[in-house]
Amino acid sequence: MQTLTQQPFEDYRASLLTRVKRLVVKVGSGVLTGPQGLNLSVINDLSTCIFEIKQKGIQVILVSSGAIASGLKKLRFTCKPKTVSEKQALAAVGQASLIMAYERAFGRFGQKVAQVLLTRDDLTNRRRYLNARNTLITLLSLDIVPIINENDTVVVDEIKFGDNDNLSALVTNMMDADLLVNLTDIDGLFDKDPRTNPDAELVGVVGKVDQRIRNFASVIPGFLGTGGMSSKIKAAQKLSLAGIPTIIANGLRKGILKEIFDGKEVGTLFLPRANGLCKRKHWIAFTKSPKGEIIVDQGAERAIVSNGKSLLPSGIIEVRGKFGVGDSVVITSEYGKNIAIGLVNYQASDIQRIKGMRTNQIKATLGFKYHDEVIHRDNLVLTSEAEEGIEECHFSN
């Protein structure tokens, strides 16, 4: 695995910023909200900086948390809601206040904004994914700043604070952006929690997300968000694997975006992998949730991992879960090792019938044959390709 560490850190950061043509900025609840609700001074500063960046010819997409936290303050809840319906109600109330605040802030410069609410389904379904991409491209071409948030009013299983770290990474990759700036309530990644350890040291640059970096992140929790620094590290890792850098910086610091684009060494820069996953493979690895699992024998494992081959029915030992054509499944060795994730050409019940068979037996068994391969190699991502990131992708009944 290569990272762009051949250049000195300062030179790389400077050259990176000159190449940015499309930027995604993600801002968290801890930055946007305070004891009295929305922090309007932060929103005004953010809009000013984004408008100035746009004057340099850079397109900007904003991924903004804060709907539930804003609703929490507006309805005077004294603690986090416990039920999904309460969270959804707070999101509905808070999202209205949030987008109005942005509209006023950007309106000072005559800058138009658009609200875009997404769910995970919008990105896991390939057609809707492409539709979302086309809509955002059109908004950018009209000189509009898209403001994206997860649609917390309808999401059930994914409704949690901090999801927008992952969403911002997926949007950055989907939109071919050159950089993600993830704004949080501390200066970046530290070796200890700086809020309780005065001797904590800022990590200026990360070449690769390894266990040491994960350990640093795990001791820095979020207050309004559940993910804290760990979810931001995971998002940065996903983008690194796509060949896109990330900067985590302090959104409470006035003019932070201007400082970044003035070339100042603020925040933590996560370097991209030199040879990143193509967009489609990144989508397979990190956007679609696996609906099942296919266990393969040693021969199939060797063919897939060492020889870059497709998965044929002859190498399949067992099929778990209920899934349809085009769904994502985890491929596991007979010893339980996660070796890949891919999109299937047959539904689970059909694979169950043809497992262990040769390809010339498929039609006689099923009465039809879509493909020779159960998973084509072009629709398959190895664990080794995605490093540790794909290790977290497991199927459970």
Image (tube, rainbow, N blue to C red):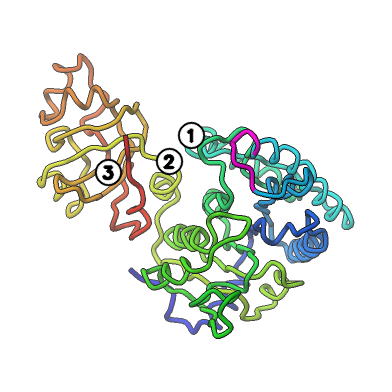
Sequence-wise, the earlier of marks 1 and 2 is: 1
12 sits left or right of 316 in the view: right
Q: Residue at x 58, y 83 (%)?
A: 198
In the image, is 180 to the left or to the right of 111?
left
- Residue 328: x and y in percent read 35, 37
**Which SS class for mark 3?**
helix
**Left or right of 384 in this view: 154:** right
Q: Quadrant of residue 150?
A: top right
Q: Residue 339, percent across and down?
A: 24, 50
Residue in view at x 53 percent, y 48 percent: 174
Quick one: 156 or 75, which is closer to the camera?
Answer: 75
Label 1 to label 2: alpha-carbon separation: 8 Å
Residue at the image position 82 percent from the left and 63 percent from the top: 41
- List the residue tagged with mark 1: 125
In this figure, which residue is indicated by the disc labeled 3?
A: 377
Q: Can you give x and y, in whole percent of width and height, for residue 283 in the image?
A: 44, 46
Earlier residue among tags 2 and 3: 2
Q: Secondary structure at mark 2?
A: loop
Magenta region: which residues? 80-86
Residue 288 has which mark?
2
Which amino acid type corresponds to the residue marked 3 in the rendered image? Arg
Is disc 3 surrounded by few (<14), some (14 to 19) or many (20+) residues within 10 Å?
Answer: some
